[in-house]
């Protein structure tokens, strides 16, 4: 999708990052969202500056401030989603439901936790839909950028590409 002709709407799939703390991962996610036409949302505080050289090296020319929405807090994020009646799906290794069996809908926001700590338990309790990416036993987790790519591709396949 050409960035110049696509206007993001409430119908788009959105990727939300809760307090991201690794600049290279956030940059890779920005590139993935830009290339696949998804809106990225960042829930502050961010654990690095957008001027960080590690961020800039990976993001290259894919970062455009108008394509990234920021929320000052998790409370602001939840208020905005409730106001617009948007469904939030939390991706977590603690979930019991696989994304394989989940039906994504237009307008969904898919929330990913911090690379170092996930999301607090209070957020788990606030989100009805919690999904996991099935993995081999005794493996902790995928890199967040890889996880976003997997889930974004599946959600877009379901709502846009079929």
Image (cartoon, rainbow, N blue to C red):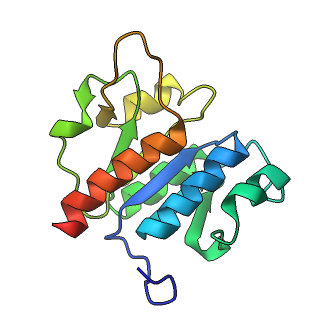
The residue depicted at 43 percent of the width and 77 percent of the height is: 8
Query: What percent of the width, then of the height, locates residue 54?
Result: 79, 50
Nearer the observer, 162 or 75 = 162
Is residue 66 visible to the viewer in this orientation of the structure? yes
Residue 127 relative to residue 118: left or right = left
Examine the rendered structure and indicate whether residue 108 appears above or below residue 22: below
Using the rendered view, name the quadrant where residue 70 is placed: bottom right
The residue depicted at 70 percent of the width and 66 percent of the height is: 60
Query: What percent of the width, then of the height, locates residue 27?
Result: 65, 55
Quadrant for the N terminus, please. bottom left
Examine the rendered structure and indicate whether residue 157 appears above or below residue 126: below
Examine the rendered structure and indicate whether residue 1 appears above or below residue 92: below
Nearer the observer, 153 or 19 = 153
Task: Name the outermost residue toward the top.
Answer: 138
The residue depicted at 22 percent of the width and 68 percent of the height is: 161
Quadrant for the C terminus, please. bottom left
The residue depicted at 43 percent of the width and 50 percent of the height is: 149
Is residue 45 visible to the viewer in this orientation of the structure? no
Task: Name the outermost residue toward the bottom.
Answer: 5
Query: What percent of the width, then of the height, locates residue 39?
Result: 47, 66
Nearer the observer, 10 or 139 = 139
Q: How many marks?
A: 0
Residue 83 relative to residue 31: left or right = left
Residue 24 relative to residue 125: left or right = right
């Amino acid at each position: 999708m050409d960035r110049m002709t696509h206007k993001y709407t409430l119908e788009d799939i959105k990727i939300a990052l809760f307090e991201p703390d690794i600049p290279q991962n956030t940059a890779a996610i920005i590139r993935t969202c830009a290339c696949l036409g998804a809106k990225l949302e960042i829930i502050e505080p961010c654990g690095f500056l957008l001027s960080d050289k590690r961020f800039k090296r990976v993001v290259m020319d894919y970062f455009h401030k108008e394509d990234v929405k920021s929320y000052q807090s998790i409370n602001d994020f939840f208020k905005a989603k409730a106001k617009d009646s948007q469904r939030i799906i939390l991706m977590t290794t603690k979930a019991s439901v696989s994304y394989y069996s989940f039906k994504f809908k237009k307008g969904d926001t898919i929330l990913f936790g911090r690379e170092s700590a996930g999301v607090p338990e209070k957020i788990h309790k606030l989100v009805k839909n919690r999904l996991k990416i099935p993995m081999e036993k005794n493996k902790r987790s995928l890199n967040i950028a890889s996880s976003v790519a997997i889930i974004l591709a599946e959600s877009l396949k379901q709502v846009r590409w079929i």
